[in-house]
Image: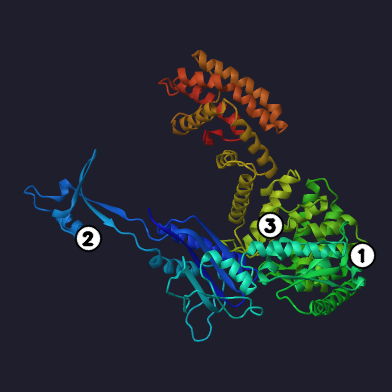
Amino acid sequence: MSQSKDLLFELGCEELPPKSLLKLSNALLNHIEIGLKESELDYLSANAYATPRRLAVIIKGLSTTQSDKLVEKRGPAIKAAFADDGTPSRAAVGFATGCGTTVDKLDRLKTDKGEWLAFKQEVKGKSTEQLMPDIIRKSIHLLPIAKRMRWGSYNTEFVRPVHWCVLLFGCDVIETEILGLKTSNQSQGHRFHSPQQITVESSDGYLDTLNQQGKVIADFSDRQSIIQDSANAAAKTVNGVAYIEDDLLEEITALNEWPVPVLGNFDTRFLDLPIEVLITTMQINQKYFPIKDTKGNLLPHFITFSNIESSRPQSIQEGNERVIMPRLADAEFFWHQDRKQSLEDRVSSLETIVFQKTLGTLSDKTKRVEKLAEYLAKQLNTDVALAKRAAYLAKTDLMTDMVGEFASLQGIMGRYYALADNEPKEVAVAIEEQYFPKQSGSPTPSSSTGQVLSLAEKIDTLCGIFSAGLIPTGDKDPYALRRATLGSLRIIIEKKLDLDIVVLINLSLSQFNHKFDQEKTQQLVADFVFERLKGYSQDQGYKADEFDAVSQVKPTRPLDFMQRLQAVKTFRQLPEAESLAAANKRIINILKKSNTKPADSITGLIEAEEKNLQIAANNSAKDIQPLLEQKNYQATLTRLAQLQNDVDAFFDNVMVNTDDLTLRASRLALLSMLSEQFLKIADISKLQV
């Protein structure tokens, strides 16, 4: 049984980008684990640790060596390995030479299929000390670093200059060189509280050593919990609740090795500004947590975190209060200045901003979106005038100083300014909701006009960018078309909007004046949309074969598609499903392979089973017609499931490809009629049941 030890790797460096810290930490752990697996090194567990100045990994119960293993190679067959006189052939000699031996020392492998030359060798496993340096170097090289940097006279590259490297296996240092640094057991603590070197005896004491001697909390999740808890505690002292968003919590955690909460205040006059303006100013500019009361109203306080324990915390508080004051004053100025000009007055300025060089200006986009919004409003029986007005003003808040300073407030400020201009509330809400849903799982537009505007805006962008030839590839999607497409599908499906997505695509493409192949682009966009729909359906719990079954009949209305999908999912739970899916697959194959054309009418059937099936099929055709008109696909498939016994009896007792061509054509026509009833909903032959 192989022995094991714990391994610690820590890379110390200048402050890492806070928004990338967790991603880098997780990637380092993942690549090291992959390296251990590829090297066949067993271990019990692996954990990553990350602070602004370090990335670390601890591997518990790591084997000290690879296991020895028997390597077996199969050579040429015995018949090909020797001549009639027993002389080794060139193939046998070549195989032996490649294995570093001679033919007479090769083994023979006997199986039921014959006998071969074989080479067997016991390979002794390498030690972990030998393997780990390369595993770590490779893992660092594979980190997702957008832009690597060099420093000093070194040729090595990393996201930030590195200063120390700890590599311990048990209590012993694995001596090697990583990123130009010699490994040791010497770490460093907090930059200000404990700048001296700290000796790490083993991985067991790593976290406690850094905490007690270095004023460093190395565990990211522990640090995050401390920040969250202390922020909530600080907010309670002013009878409030800390407003903590996950992204900012992660960023603040990545900025501090020893987080200390600081409660600050600002002038109550700023509470007259829109709450989103204040929150954005505090979060984006200052990395502060705002504080709300129990009713959700903002309080004139904030929480920040200092990376040091100061002997004069009051000075840190006052310094932060001095910093936030001009920020809020700027926002106040923008708020008052922007309202001196109405949104309608800003429409003409959209002509000066290029949306995309092939697609024209924001003014051009506005005109296209307006036409799409008008069409959608008519299709959905919503107020056309409101939809056109919302589209007309949709992008005007981009021309305001507030949105120029805080881009994330686009739409939100449009709503505030529209209300200040006495625009209808529905129009104001729609201007904000055009950007909904903002991310995966976030809310879709609540208002009818917002749904219309959001769809029009997203479809124009999707079709326009595709028509300009800028189709997303791999991870590159600069116009966020995947998100826009998924958002459009969510709106249509979740708000139960009966819209034909292909019609919308064609209408949108028809508005562009530059040269492009509209038919080809329409197909590319449609394929892109339905690929996103497939991903959405799988997230909702539907299986790939269920999606394929529906997509075979090419429904172009996403809501209708999902209704069919639900019907197929329910159908496959029926006891008749397996037999009918197999029968439909058989029917499709028979029709596809037959050289005989199905008859125009079904006549001359002679067997009882085929006559019974014809009667059953005629009855089901009548029964499902009203169900299909109601789009009650689930009831339709349930009714068609009743055909199982007649279908099974037909295939058990009737030969379709009889020599009587007239009878064959009638039987093919019967099968065709049967298949078409199912294909009105989905191709159930695609189900893997």
Q: Amino acid at mark 2?
A: Gly
Other-residue count near label 2 (Cα within 10 Å), few / some / many at <14 / 14–19 / ≥20: few
Q: Residue at x 57, y 71 (%)?
A: 146
Task: Quote the CA–CA distance across marks 1 and 2.
Answer: 84 Å
Looking at the image, is mark 2 or mark 3 earlier in the sequence? 2
Q: Amino acid at mark 3?
A: Ala
Which type of secondary structure does the marked residue at label 2 adopt? helix
Which type of secondary structure does the marked residue at label 1 adopt? helix
Q: Which residue is mark 3?
A: 484
Which type of secondary structure does the marked residue at label 3 adopt? helix
Q: Which residue is mark 2?
A: 98
Looking at the image, is mark 1 or mark 2 earlier in the sequence? 2
Q: Position of residue 28 (x, y in %)?
A: 53, 65
Give the label on residue 420, or none.
1
Residue 400 location, quadrant: bottom right
Q: Position of residue 74 (x, y in %)?
A: 25, 50
